[in-house]
Image: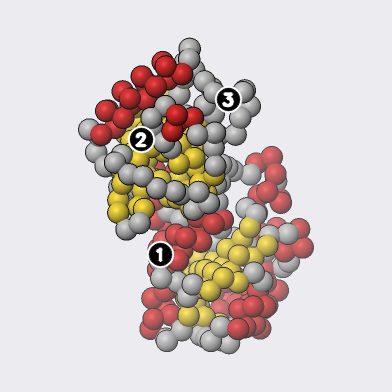
Amino acid sequence: MQKLESIPQLGCLRGPLALAIGVFDGLHLGHQEVILAAREHAARHDGRAVVLTFDPHPLRVLRPESAPLRLCGARYRAVLLERMGLDAMLVCPFTPELASTEAEDFVAELVGVCRPLGCVSVGYAWTFGKNRGGTIHSLMDLGQRHGFAVYGVPPVRVDGEVVSSTLIRQAVAAGDLARAAALSGRPYALFGKVVEGRKLGRGLGFPTANVRVEAEMLPPYGVYAASADIGGRTLAGVANLGVRPTVEKTGSVPMLEVHFFDWQGDLYAQDLEVRLGAFMRPERKFAGMEELRAQIASDVLLARSAPLPG
């Protein structure tokens, strides 16, 4: 999947281009339908399917006090999009200048650089441009004027509720990871780079991969059954998400520590996607390292008997 950083770079792609446009935080089932419409159009017309998304989240620029916590970081979003079989991804910097662009001018720029623009796929309620002046109806009018198709994808419902990033954030905050997975259309996972730690887990007999997670919206701190794909294998394990109060000072950055069963290896500096399953206990501070060691051993036994996440 080709990665682009500005709208003019769309001109380097052979068209017709089918653009799926949105913020796509979490890439839930509704987002997937928007992207599927673009992929299907590209397949029918021998074109290229491209996601056009934004960073930072528009609310970080427009109303910072109302900006939501991210479900997934930019790098994980790119990983998930690549799995969807897209030809390219454009991460458009969301700036005050872009926010003040009239909806018609934004579309005109897309039309001008694409060779040609074949379609635009968006959620039916999507708005864009200055003062959110662009709607699906004005986009359809612009499509007729400039000769591109428009797909306004209706909401997707799960158990009668419209799937949204907000709904997933609520599920994650409540620790209902099964609900978050159902709304996302994939197992709930945290993604990040493995960093070097203090090797305390190794000293206790339970070596861990310390993952600096990208997501801002995190489930409750505690111990979870976990799994990840490493070296072509799916490995089960146990994960602690939190600030490690037994060994770290107050105010530490949240970390995901994962002990994989029956596996040895070096994961430093690698990206890791860790699927979380059954919640086993909250994070707590222990009186000392021996008490912590005994609790980890108990956690491992419980996690080995838990269903494999994902």
Residue of label 2:
238
Horizontally, residue 27 falls left or right of residue 66, namely: left
Instruction: For mark 2, give the secondary structure.
Output: strand
Location of residue 228 in the rendering, given as x and y in whole percent from the top left corner: 36, 48
Residue tagged 3? 248
Q: Please, what is the three-letter code of the amino acid marked with disc 1?
A: Arg
Position of 274 with respect to 102 (left or right) is: left
Tell me if residue 241 comes above or below residue 75 in the rendering.
Answer: above
> Which amino acid is tagged 3?
Glu
Instruction: Tell me, for residue 83, which label it has, or none.
Output: 1
Q: Nearer the viewer, residue 297 or 254?
A: 297
Question: Mark 3 or mark 2, which is nearer the start of the sequence?
Answer: 2
Residue plotted at (60% across, 34% down)? 253
For mark 1, give the secondary structure: helix
In the image, residue 22 sits, relative to residue 223, either above or below, namely below
Say which mark, if any, is on residue 4: none
Find residue 18 and report its horizontal and vertical position in percent: 49, 77
Query: The disc labelled 2 sits on which kind of residue?
Result: Val
Q: Earlier in the sequence, mark 3 or mark 1?
A: 1
Q: Residue at x 69, y 40 (%)?
A: 65
* In this view, 225 is above or below 1: above
* Left or right relative to 94: residue 163: left
User: Coloring scheme of the render?
Assistant: secondary structure
Residue visible at 45% across and 29% down?
Answer: 203
Question: Which quarter of the figure has residue 301?
Answer: top left
